[in-house]
Image (cartoon, coloured by chain):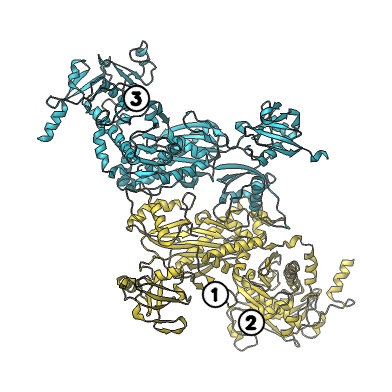
Chain colours: A yellow, B cyan
Amino acid sequence: MSEADKDALVVFTPSGKRGRFPLGTPLLKCARQLGVDIDSVCGGRGLCGRCQVQIGEGDFAKHAISSRAGNASAWNESEARYHARKGIKPGRRLSCQVQLLGDLLVDVPADSQVHKQVVRKRAEVRNIELDPAIRLHYVEVEQPDMHNPSGDLERLLQALERQWGVTGINIQGLNVDLRVLQGLQQALREADWKVTVAVHRGQVLTTIWPGFRDKAYGVAIDIGSTTVAAHLCDLASGEVLASSGIMNPQIRFGEDLMSRVSYVMMNPGGDKEMTQALREGLNRLIAEVCSEAGIAPTDILNATFVGNPIMHHLLLGIDPTELGGAPFALTFNSGITLWAEQLDLQLAPDARVYVLPCIAGHVGADAAGVILSEQPHLREEVSLVVDVGTNAEIILGNRHRLLACSSPTGPAFEGAQISSGQRAAPGAIERVRIDPVTLEPRFKVIGSDFWSDEAGFADSIKRIGITGICGSGIIEVLAELFLAGVILSDGTIDGAAAARSPRIQLDGRTYAYLLHEPAHPEEPRVVITQTDVRAIQLAKAALYAGIQLLMDRFGVEKVDRIQLAGAFGSHIDVKYAMALGMLPDCDLEQVSSAGNAAGTGARIALLNQKARDEIEQVVKRVEKVETAVEPRFQEHFVAAMAIPHRNAPYPELGKVLPLPAPRYPEPAGEGEGRRRRRRVAV
Amino acid sequence: MSEADKDALVVFTPSGKRGRFPLGTPLLKCARQLGVDIDSVCGGRGLCGRCQVQIGEGDFAKHAISSRAGNASAWNESEARYHARKGIKPGRRLSCQVQLLGDLLVDVPADSQVHKQVVRKRAEVRNIELDPAIRLHYVEVEQPDMHNPSGDLERLLQALERQWGVTGINIQGLNVDLRVLQGLQQALREADWKVTVAVHRGQVLTTIWPGFRDKAYGVAIDIGSTTVAAHLCDLASGEVLASSGIMNPQIRFGEDLMSRVSYVMMNPGGDKEMTQALREGLNRLIAEVCSEAGIAPTDILNATFVGNPIMHHLLLGIDPTELGGAPFALTFNSGITLWAEQLDLQLAPDARVYVLPCIAGHVGADAAGVILSEQPHLREEVSLVVDVGTNAEIILGNRHRLLACSSPTGPAFEGAQISSGQRAAPGAIERVRIDPVTLEPRFKVIGSDFWSDEAGFADSIKRIGITGICGSGIIEVLAELFLAGVILSDGTIDGAAAARSPRIQLDGRTYAYLLHEPAHPEEPRVVITQTDVRAIQLAKAALYAGIQLLMDRFGVEKVDRIQLAGAFGSHIDVKYAMALGMLPDCDLEQVSSAGNAAGTGARIALLNQKARDEIEQVVKRVEKVETAVEPRFQEHFVAAMAIPHRNAPYPELGKVLPLPAPRYPEPAGEGEGRRRRRRVAV
C-alpha cells in the first residue's frame, strides 16, 4: 500500500462530524465533504482567512481520537503570505491550506462558521443566525476559447456552479443586472479572470469586482414617524459597525401620521414632497453611518426597511391617502425586493432593498419587525407584544395562532396633551415616588443621577432645570397617586385628599396634584390635573381594550409573557403601568422591555435571508383585527377606563404591589362623578 | 325534470370538441370547459368583442347534430350595446353573451382564437402562432373589507387568479413593477374596481389601466450595421401596423463594424457615444412607426431586438472592444429581458424588452432571428441558410444538429470595392445578360422597368441615368462572362476574347469588359475590371469556404435546401450566384430568398413568447465554428477561388444552366496567371 493510498481520521468539533480521508487532503475539503459548516469567500485559495480552525493536541477519549499537531501539514507559502498580510492568531490555521497527514481533531471556532450566531444582548430572545441575502464569491473564470465559443458571463456562471455550487442564476430574466454585464468583460480581464461577485439570494448577480474582495455591508433602517434609525452592519460578521438616527424630515409636513396624510389630501403632490424629503433624509443618514464606519455608501449592497404603513407607502412613493380613512386599505401586504435606485438611495449601483411586509392598514412593517425580533410565533406560551406610540400595535399569540391589531392610544403616553407634559429629554421628570401618608413626592429628572430628596440633587439639576414631566413620569405619578388613594377607581382626583396635603389643590371645578413648585417663579410648576388623568385614562383604556379584543378572539383570560417594544416600553416601570391598567395582569418576571424591536427585526431580515421568508409567511397567517369595526371594542374601552380596570383582576401584580380596594366617588357627594352625571341628566 | 335540469349538446368547430351543458349556459363558458380556444380580454363581460362565434343552422351529419339559430338566446343588452359601439358582423354573436337553449353547432372563426395564426407570405415557412409575452386581462376586483383586511394588490392578484387562472405572479421578487404599485390604488378607485392589467409572461404585472382596455402593441426591431428596421405590431391580432427603417446613426462613427470597434478603441467613451446615438435613433424610429399607426410610443408594452454581436452589445451599453479581436468573446450568449427604461427607450414606462441571444462572437442575435424565421432546426432535410452582408452568417443543419459560423466576405457583394460599384439605388445596373457569341450586353437599371434593348428604355432612364452597378448586377455580369467563356476558371478575363468583341479591352496589364459606354461623356462608363473579378472571387471563396467547413463538420456533401436571407439574398438570381460558385450545388427548386429573415425572427419572438424559449434552447445546442481557427478554412478558400470551384461538382445547376468545361490560362502563354507565377519566382 503506497503512501498515497493511506488515509487518516478527522473529527470536527463542535459538530462531532468525522470521516477518513486520504493523506494530503486539505482540511477544508474534508469539512465540505462531511457537511461541516466552515466559511470561505475565496474558495480555498488562502486569501480570505475565513476558514480558520484550531488543531487539537492530545488524546480525546470522547471522540476516540489521538490528535497531534504534527499530523497537520506545516505552513505553506499561501498561509505564510496570509499571516504576513492579516495575521493568524496563535493556534489557528487556514483549513484550506492545511493537509491531513494523520489523525486530527479539528475545532471550528464560532467565527469561522458561515451560519455563525450573531449574539443578541437579551437572554430571552434567539440569537440571529448569520445568513445574509448577499453573499460574496471569489471565482477564477475560464478564458474564452475560440474552439468552443461561449459568453464571458456563461463561463463566470459555470465557475460559480463548479466552485461554489451556485446554480440558481438564470440570466434570461432579470437575474443579472445590466450594469454587471456592462462591466463584466473589463473586470474579468483587469484581474486576470479572477473576480469576486455578489449574489443576491443565490439568484441574482448584483455586483462584480476585479480580484478578491471580502467586505460586504448592509444597512437596516427603521422609519418611525418621528425618528429614523439606521444600523450599518458587516454582512460577513453580522456586527453593527455604526448606528445613528435623525428626525424624520417629514415632521415639517405634520407632527403625527394623520396630519401628514391630511397634508397629502390638501396639497396635490404632497406625497411626492414627503417621499423626496424622506429619501433625502435616508441618504444623509446612510452617509452618516458610513462615514462613522469609514466606508462609502456605495459599499452597501443590501438594505432592509421597517416602518408603519404610512411611512412604508411614502418610502415606496405610494400616496398614503387610502390609509388615512376607512377601510384603511394597504396597496399591498407582502414584502418587496427592489433596486436601491428605485427608491433614489445612493447605495451600490445594483444594491437590493427589502421592505418588510405590512400586516394591515394600521399594523405596519414595523410590527412585522417586532414579530421577527420577539418571535411570539415560535413559542408555546401566549405572548403579548405591545409597541406603544401614537398608535399602539398589539400582537398576541403563540406558535399556533397569532393576532394583531392597532389601537388609537393618541400621544398622551409620549407626554403630549398633558398639561406639564414634554418629550423625554433633559429636565423632564421621569421617576416619581409619593409617600402614601404625607403625599410628599420625590422624583428623578432626566440628566441627573440623584433623587430629588438626595444631597447633590439641587446641584445636579442647576444647568438643566426641571422643565416638565415625560411619559414614564406621568405613568409613575398617576400610579403612585392611585396607590396612595388620591386618585379613585374612576380616575377622579379625590377632593377629600386635600385635607391630607396642601399639594392637592382645587383647580377650577376639579382637583390637581402639585408635583413640583419651582424655587424661582420663572421656572414652570409641574402639576397633574384632572384633565391629565383623563388623557392617560383614555389612552390606556384604548390600549387595554385592543389587548382585550385580541385575548377574547384568541380565547385566553391571561397572557404568559409581555414584551414592551419601542422607546416608551424601554423606560416605563412595568408594575406602575400595570397598576394603572395599561396592561393585563401577568407574572412580572415575564414582562420585559424589547427595546427597538422593529429596528432589530430589520437587522434580522438584513442578516438572515430566511427570516424574510419566515416573516412573509407569518404575516400571511396573522389574524388582523380592526378595532374600529369590532362591536365589543367600545364596551372593553369603557370597562378599561377604571383604574386599573372595572372588573379585570390583578392577582399577579397584587403579589408585588398591594392595590387599594376599588373606591368610587360617593354618589351623593360633591365629587366630579356626580356633577358630570348631573350635567348629562340636564 | 325541471327546465333548469335540462341540458343540450354543443359542438365547436373547427376543433370538433363537444359536450352537453345545462340550458342557459353561456357559450364561452361551454368553450372554456371543453378547452376550446376562444379569445377574451374582458373575461365574458361583453366589452372586448374578441369571443365572436358563428351559429350553425341546419343538420350537420358529420357532427351528428341538428343546430338551429333559435337554440341560441336572443341578443341581450350587453351584446346590443357592443354592436352599437363597435359593430358585430352579420351572422356573428358574442359567445360570452349567448346562452345555450338547445343543440348548437358553434364555429369559432380564426380571428376569435387566442392562439390564432399570423399568416406569413412565403409558403415554405410556418405561420406564426399568436401567443404574445404581454397579455391584457380585464378584472373586477373585490373592494377592501375591514373585517378581513388585505392589500389592494393581493385582491387584484386574487381576481386575476379566479377570473383568468393567472397564478404565476409573486410580488416578493421584482414581479410587480414599483410604478404599478404607485398607481394601483388610484386606478382601482377611479374605475370602480374595474381595471385592465398587462401581465408579462404570466409572471410580471407591468401596467394597470382604469377600466377596460384591449389594445396592446409591440415593436420588433432589427439593428443592422447600415439600417435599422422596425415593425410595429398589434399584439392582439399579430398584424403589422407600420414598418419603417432609418440609417443606423452609428454610421458617422464608421461605415462598417470593424471601423466602429476601432473608433471605440481609439476614443475613450466612444462606445457610450455610439450607444447613445443608436438609442436616440431607435426612439426616433419608434416615434415614426407609432405616428404612422396613430398610437403613442407609450402604448408599446413590449419590444424585441435582433442585431449582430456588435450592435447587440452597443444596444445594451456594453463596450464591444472584445468582439473586435480574437478570441471574439461575447459578454454573454443568452437572451435577456430588460425594462425598456434600461435602454433609454421611450415606450410604456414599464415596457419589457427582449433581446434575442447571440450565438457566437461573429454570429449574432440576427442569426438567431434567421433561425427562428427559417426553422432549419425543425426539418429533417439539411438546410443551408446564408445571410450575406459584410460578414456572411452561415447556418447549416437539420432537426438533429445545427452548425453556425461567420465568414469574412467583405463588402464586395454590396458593390463596395468594385470599380463601377454602388449601392442598390436608382441608376444602378441590377440585371445583365450577355450574348455568348457577340458578347453584347443588355441590362436593367433600378428605377426602370425596361431592358436596355427595349424600346422605351432610353426614355425611362432619362431622369435617373446609369450611375454604376450594384451587387446583383456584378454577380450576373460575372456569371454571364464566365458562361460566355470570357472569364476563365481561375477568374482571369481572357485576353483572347478581345478578338471576339471590342468590349474586351486592355486595362493596364489585364483585361476589362466594357458593360456600358455612356452617350454623354460626363456620365460614368461602367467597366468590369480584373480587380473587380478578384474582389468577388475573394468574397465568394470566403463564403463558400465557410459553407464547406460546416458541411465537412456536419458530414454532408450536398444540402437539401438553401435559404438566402437579407437584402442581397432577395435580389440576386440564385442560378448566377451558383454559377459563380458562391453557393454549393443544390436543386434550384429548393433555393429561395428568405427576405429580412432576422427581422422576421424578431417579429416571431414578439408575437410568440414560446419562440423565445425555443431560440434560447436552439442557440445553446448550435455548434459554433470559428473559421479563423479552422485549419481547413484556408484550403477550402483556395479551392473556392476557382469559378465555380476547383473540384466541387454542380450537377443540379448543370440541369438548368450548361456550364462551360473548366478552362485555365495557358501556362506558356502571355496570360496573367503565368506572369504572376513568374513574378513570384523572381
* Residue B513 in view, yes or no: yes
The quadrant where residue B370 appears: top left
Q: Residue B51's x, y, as percent? A: 65, 35
The residue under label 1 is which amino acid type? Arg
The quadrant where residue A382 appears: bottom right
The residue under label 2 is which amino acid type? Lys
Q: Residue A94's x, y, as percent? A: 37, 73
Q: Residue B575: which numbered mark, if any?
A: 3
Q: Report the residue marked by disc 1.
A: A120
Q: Report the residue marked by disc 2.
A: A444
Residue farthest toward the left in the current orientation of the protein: B682
- Report in which chain the residue with disc 2 lies: A
The residue under label 3 is which amino acid type? Lys
Q: Residue B321's x, y, as percent? A: 33, 47
Mark 1 or 2, nearer chain start: 1
| Mark 3 and mark 2 residues within 8 Å of each other at the beta carbon | no
- Report in which chain the residue with disc 1 lies: A
